[in-house]
Image (spheres, grey):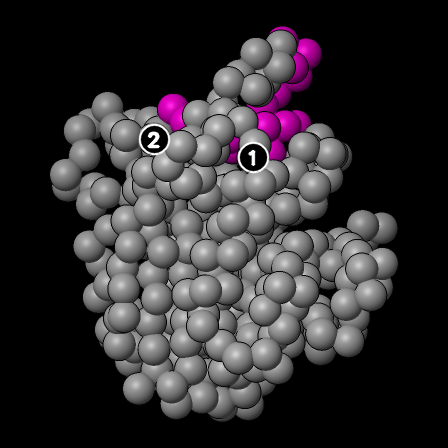
Amino acid sequence: MTAAAVGGDDDSGHHGSSGLRNTWRVQMVSGELDLTGLRRVYGRPGSRLFYRAVCRNARHWGWTEPGQSKWRCWRAQRQLEGVLGRKLALPAGSRVLDAGCGSGVVARELARRFGVRVTGVDVLDFHVREARRLSVRAALEDRTTFSWGDYHDLEFADGSFDGAYSMETLVHAYDPARALAEFHRVLRPGGRLVLLGPVGAPREEMSPEGRAVLGPYLDAMSFPGAKRYDTRSLNELLIGAGFRIEEALDATARYRPTSDALYAYFRAPYALLRLFGPAERWLGMRSVVEMYQIRDYVSWYVHTAVKP
C-alpha cells in the first residue's frame, strides 16, 4: 500500500520548492501529517527492496477469481487494477486522479489498458521520482503525470477530473472526511470515485483480543484513517461528502487468496530476519505477514460513488 499527502524531504535530506516546504512545516506543526511514519513505512531500504523486487513496484493487494491459483500474485494485482478500471467506467481520454500514486504502477496500467489520462499525487518524493522515471521507460509520460500533493488539500480547480481513485491509500488519511470532500470538489458533476482497500469492523463489535491485535498493526503501518472509519461509517462519510454510493462491494473473498499466499511465502523469511534486527527494518514484509494475522478483523471493500 502507499500514501498521499504533502511533499517532503528527498532522499538526501533536501527540500523541494519553498512553497511545498512551508506547507509541509505548517502541517507537521499542526500534527496532521505523520510524514515521519510514512517515510518509515515506505522509505526504509528493506521496504523499498521488498516492493521493488517482490511486488514489481506495486504497493497493493490482488484480486483472485474463483478457481484461480492463489500463488500468482502478480496476476492478481493486474486483475485488481482491471476491476478498478471497470468500476471507473470512463471513456478513453478521461482525466483521472490517483490519490496516493506510489511509483505509478496503477496509473500506468489504467493509462495503458483503458486509455485514460492519470494525474498522481503522493507525499513521498522518491515515489514521485520513481513514478516519473518508470512512466518515461514505459513511454507513458504523455498519459501519466505525477507530483507532490496532499489529497486533503489538492491544488486543482473545482471539477478538474472525470474520475478519482484511492488504491488502498485512504487508510493513511489523517482526516478521511476532509479527503473525501476534496475528491468531491475536484470531480466534475457526474464524476466517479472508486475506493479500494481494507476496512476494519466497528471497534465496539471487536473482542478485546481483536483490538489488541489490530491497534499495534495500524500504528506500525501509519494507518490513522483506518482508525477513523469502519465498515459502517465509511458509507456515512461518503454520503456526508456529497457522494451518491453506487456500490459497496465486500470483496474479501477475492482479496483473501493474495493474503494467504503472501503469508505462506514470507512468514519464515520474516521470522528469520527478525532475529537480526527490529521489525521496523522490514515493514513491507511485516505488512503482508501481519495482515494475515489480523484477517478476521478486516474486510476488503470496493466502493464506487458518483458526484451528483
Q: Which is nearer the N-term, disc 2 or disc 1?
A: 1
Residue 17 versus residue 33 in the image, above or below: below
Q: Is residue 119 left or right of residue 221?
A: right
Tell me the distance, in whole angstroms, between the alpha carbons under discs 2 and 1. Answer: 18 Å
Residue 123, given in percent of the width and then of the height, sits at 63, 60
> Three-letter amino acid code at disc 1?
Cys
**Residue at horizontal 85 percent and vertical 50 percent from the top:** 12
**Residue at horizontal 65 percent and vertical 68 percent from the top:** 111
Crowd around label 2: few <14 · some 14–19 · many ≥20 (10 Å): some
Quarter occupied by the C terminus: bottom left
Q: Which residues are magenta?
A: 273-293
Residue 147, given in percent of the width and then of the height, sits at 70, 70
Q: Nearer the viewer, mark 2 or mark 1?
A: 1
Q: Which residue is most to the front?
A: 67
> Three-letter amino acid code at disc 2?
Arg
Return the residue nearer the eye: 26 or 194: 194
Predominant secondary structure, magenta span? helix
Crowd around label 1: few <14 · some 14–19 · many ≥20 (10 Å): many
Question: Is residue 286 one of those drawn in magenta?
Answer: yes
Return the residue nearer the eye: 293 or 216: 293
Question: According to the image, label 1 marks what residue?
Answer: 73
Residue 26 versus residue 282 in the image, above or below: below
Say if mark 2 contacts mark 1, CB within 8 Å. Answer: no
Figure quadrant of residue 25: bottom right
Question: According to the image, label 2 marks what residue?
Answer: 295
Residue 8, given in percent of the width and then of the height, sits at 69, 60
Residue 292 versus residue 89 in the image, above or below: above
Q: Is residue 99 visible?
A: yes
**Residue at horizontal 41 percent and vertical 61 percent from the top:** 195
Question: Is residue 107 one of those drawn in magenta?
Answer: no
